[in-house]
Image: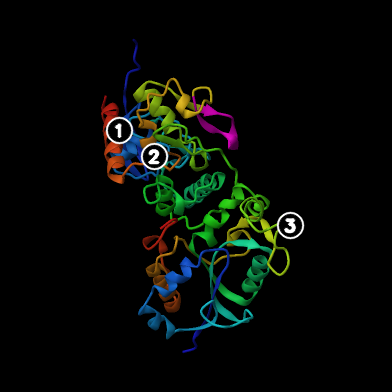
């Protein structure tokens, strides 16, 4: 196999000189240098899709905001990770994520343990800036252990990626487009009837919200399962 | 010093946030030195008064009466605090939006009712339900947001104290959605 030669590239993040390997993304180099960029769909050890747009950054010379998790570094580029423009856009992106589905924190299984909720807190978003969409999706509780509630889904696709890249089953995928998009099993079968699902639960434990959750489980057990899966992802990232 | 004219109102919510105000316990005495409660479920005023300095609103907007009230409140209040998730996001009050008001009325007064022989809904005296439950800021300008379900009493105290002292405050240290 012919591999592209990896070279060292130097550039600036927030005016600080940094270096990284040419196959690295802006986000990876930022993290290596302890520069914080907010993320949501990103999960170390999985491929990057840039679906949530939370990690947008400015690159000098371009008037577009670029997701740092999918943008490869370039020699001499000048990256800004925080500015009034980025802040306004992140707030709007987060508002749209909240308004698109029904995230009623107070009655959610993930209340207090939700990355979407935490992101609102982190970015000081105290109200949603666009009207709520109020669309209702059917809940799939057919599986003996797990539930899929699309009403709480932010379409980050972590579940799809972990099932495909770590478990190797690819039982999950995406159906429909835009605002109607849903996570499905196989050819949109009820979860219990999915032939390719191995019931490993990885999808459940990488879900940032309460869209996928395990039935009748204590917080302690859930934490243990989550830490096992996160450990697997860490090891994958080091390969 | 002139006292702050304070109003509080409970719209479509569970009153849990008003309970949270009372949960300030001894700190209520401290706050009471600076405020005059001119309208609230705690006091017996029938009409929403004029020239209110600060109105704390719990609950979402669910009826034509809520809309009428909120517009009057906005016109008569200098500042408005949206208190709790219902006021800010619609929260539990807005969960019926996924089915619509008609379906909810049908379920309560039709399917689940034992004695309602006519099958009709209450439509006299009681306010009419809106098609959708709305958070406050979709109808009026809200000056401060205090999320939480219910908003912790400490957060309410800290916000009121900051407003009384006329300083800026970052509420994210005290509360968040669903807290």
Looking at the image, which residue is at 65% across and 53% down?
A: B101
Question: Are dots 1 and 3 on a single chain?
Answer: no
Chain of the residue that carries numbered disc 1 in the rendered image: A
Q: Is residue A64 left or right of residue A160?
A: right
Question: Are dots 2 and 3 on a single chain?
Answer: no
Looking at the image, which residue is at 49% across and 36% down?
A: A155
Q: Which mark is residue B118?
A: 3
Range of magenta residues: A174-185
Q: Which mark is residue A229?
A: 1
Indicate the position of residue A10 as horizontal and vertical percent values. 33, 33
> What is the C-alpha distance between the residues marked 2 and 3?
41 Å
Name the element at disc 3: loop
Quadrant in the picture for residue A49: top left
Is B21 drawn above or below residue A180 in the view shown? Answer: below
Is B4 drawn above or below residue B116 in the view shown? Answer: below
Q: Earlier in the sequence, mark 2 or mark 1?
A: 2
Chain of the residue that carries numbered disc 3 in the rendered image: B
A102 and A220: which is toward the camera? A220
Q: Which mark is residue A215?
A: 2
Indicate the position of residue A158 as horizontal and vertical percent values. 42, 33
């Amino acid at each position: 196999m012919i591999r592209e030669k990896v070279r060292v590239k130097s550039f600036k993040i927030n005016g600080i000189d940094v270096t990284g390997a040419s196959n690295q993304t802006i986000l990876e180099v930022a993290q290596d240098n302890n520069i914080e960029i907010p993320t949501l769909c990103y999960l170390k050890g999985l491929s990057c899709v840039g679906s949530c747009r939370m990690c947008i950054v400015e690159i000098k010379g371009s008037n577009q905001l670029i997701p740092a998790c999918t943008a490869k570094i370039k020699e001499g580029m000048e990256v800004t990770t925080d500015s009034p423009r980025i802040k306004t856009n992140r707030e709007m992106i987060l508002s749209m994520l909240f308004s698109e589905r029904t995230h009623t924190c107070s009655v959610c299984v993930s209340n207090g343990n939700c990355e979407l909720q935490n992101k609102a807190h982190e970015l000081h978003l105290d109200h949603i800036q666009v009207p709520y969409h109020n669309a209702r999706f059917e809940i799939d509780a057919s599986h003996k252990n797990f539930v899929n509630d699309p009403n709480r889904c932010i379409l980050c696709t972590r579940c799809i990626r972990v099932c495909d890249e770590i478990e190797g089953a690819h039982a999950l995928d995406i159906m429909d487009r835009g605002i109607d998009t849903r996570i499905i099993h196989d050819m949109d079968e009820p979860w219990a009837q999915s032939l390719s699902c191995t019931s490993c639960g990885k999808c459940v434990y990488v879900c940032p919200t309460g869209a996928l959750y395990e039935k009748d489980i204590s917080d302690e057990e859930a934490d243990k399962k989550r830490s096992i899966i996160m450990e697997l992802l860490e090891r994958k990232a080091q390969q | 010093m002139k006292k702050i004219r304070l109003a509080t109102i409970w719209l479509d919510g569970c009153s849990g946030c008003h309970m949270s105000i009372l949960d300030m316990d001894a700190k209520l005495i401290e706050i009471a030195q600076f405020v005059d409660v001119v309208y609230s479920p705690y006091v017996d005023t029938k009409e929403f008064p004029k020239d209110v300095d600060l109105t704390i609103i719990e609950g979402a907007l669910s009826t034509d009466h809520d809309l009428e009230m909120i517009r009057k409140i906005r016109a008569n209040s200098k500042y408005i605090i949206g208190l709790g998730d219902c006021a800010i996001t619609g929260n539990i009050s807005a969960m019926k939006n996924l089915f619509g008001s008609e379906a909810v009325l049908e379920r309560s007064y039709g399917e689940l009712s034992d004695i309602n022989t006519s099958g009709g809904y209450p439509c006299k005296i009681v306010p009419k339900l809106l098609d959708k439950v709305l958070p406050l800021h979709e109808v009026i300008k809200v000056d401060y947001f205090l999320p939480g379900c219910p908003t912790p009493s400490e957060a309410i105290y800290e916000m009121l104290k900051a407003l009384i002292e006329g300083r800026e405050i970052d509420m994210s240290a005290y509360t968040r959605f669903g807290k």
